Image (spheres, rainbow, N blue to C red):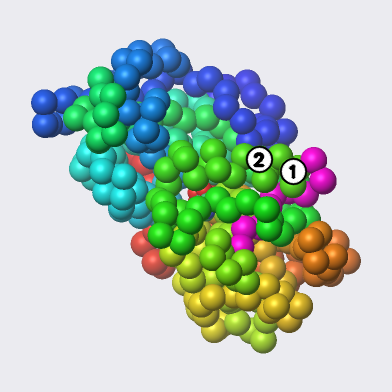
Amino acid sequence: MKNIDWKHLPFQYSKTDYNVRCYYQDGKWGELELSSSEFVELHMASTCLHYGQEIFEGLKAYRGTDGKIRLFRIEENWKRMQRSAKGIMMQSPPFEIFEKAIITAVKKNKEYVPPHGTGATLYIRPLLIGLGPEVGVRPARDYLFMVFVTPVGPYFKDGFNPVDVMICRDFDRAAPLGTGAYKVGGNYAASLLSLKIAHDGGFATSLYLDAKEKKYIDEAGPANFFGIKNNTYITPLSKSILPSITNMSLMALAEDMGLKVERRPVGVDELDSFEEVGACGTAAVITPIRKIVDTDNNKFYDYSNDNKPGPISTQLYEHLVAVQFGDEEDKHGWVRILD
Ligand code: PLP
Ligand code: COI
């Protein structure tokens, strides 16, 4: 195991020993290549540099109490990468290549998978880019699929502790029929300015509304949104949000816990009625929300609960991480143990 201060890791890039690459050229995928370089050589007319042909994924490797390394729902990340690729006309790797690249990247860097109980995990970042040369607006012919890994702590620095978020009315991250449901780099570029404004105001992230009417909740920066009331887990249904694998898993766990689950438009005017609200995602896990501020309307919604996460969010969080780290039976078959 590497000598790293695991307990105080930020959610930030740090170098590991290897990454994995695979090129799509002349209409086919090549062999996986192991690399120890952190750099990529690109043609300056690559479509990823000009026309935003870039998609990525995010998942994690978890070290269990038994010392074994686990991956969570990797098939779902692959399916989403396929959908993102189709959405912006890219070639994407078949499951075998996706899976082998991830497993190789994790195993070759296994000393960077944080020890159990430190709260840290190994973040896995698969990415796919269009290569050049093209200058007209059209999809690339060649592609590079890569996987790198980096040990991380919680995304929102407080971890499983309530944060404040700010409703964003001046910006949209994605248009109703745009690329919001795909994990394309451009969506994140579109979010940077509003995130900066939110951060400068002391908020963990901005809460996006539907771009058309500004009436419904879309998502919470790089995470989905959920609310809880009357023993029901409620999460927005919207074409412009990223279908979160964490959220999908929480919906299943909520049902296991006997909660009702509703996936439907969630109006801003409903915020008053929630008992608990939170953000969820691979990086964010569950981040409880303490306060939602709507500056433009001079309103705020308070869920503070003595500054502690709400009881249902806590149970959901505990279940999810227990499955991910192998402390609880994996009855949905979500976890892959690496040998
Ligand atoms: N929404 C956005 C915009 C994201 O970037 C992410 C992170 O991947 C999520 C939601 C959460 O998705 P997942 O739970 O699959 O990580
Ligand atoms: C994730 O949760 O995996 C993300 O991709 C969020 C963010 C770091 C982009």
Quarter of the image for the C terminus: give it: top left
Q: Is residue 318 visible?
A: no
Question: Is 229 situated above or below 160?
Answer: below
- Across and down, in percent, residue 64 comes to 52, 46
Quarter of the image for the N terminus: give it: top right
Residue 202 colored in magenta in the image: yes
Q: Quadrant of residue 4?
A: top right
**Residue at horizontal 78 percent and vertical 56 percent from the top:** 164
Residue positioned most to the front: 136
- Label 1 residue SS: helix
Q: Which residue is mark 2?
A: 193
Q: Is residue 199 visible?
A: yes
Q: Which residue is mark 1?
A: 197
Residue 179 or 323: which is nearer the viewer?
179
Question: Is 185 situated above or below 171?
Answer: above
Q: CA distance from mark 1 to mark 2?
A: 6 Å
- Across and down, in percent, residue 208 comes to 62, 58
**Residue at horizontal 80 percent and vertical 66 percent from the top:** 297
Residue positioned most to the right: 306
Type of amino acid under label 1: Ile
Tags 1 and 2 in contact by the CB under 8 Å rule? yes
Residue range corresponding to the magenta coloring: 200-209
- Label 2 residue SS: helix
Residue 5 or 177: which is nearer the viewer?
177
Rate crowding at label 1 as few (under 14), some (14 to 19) or many (20 or more) other CA atoms within 10 Å.
some
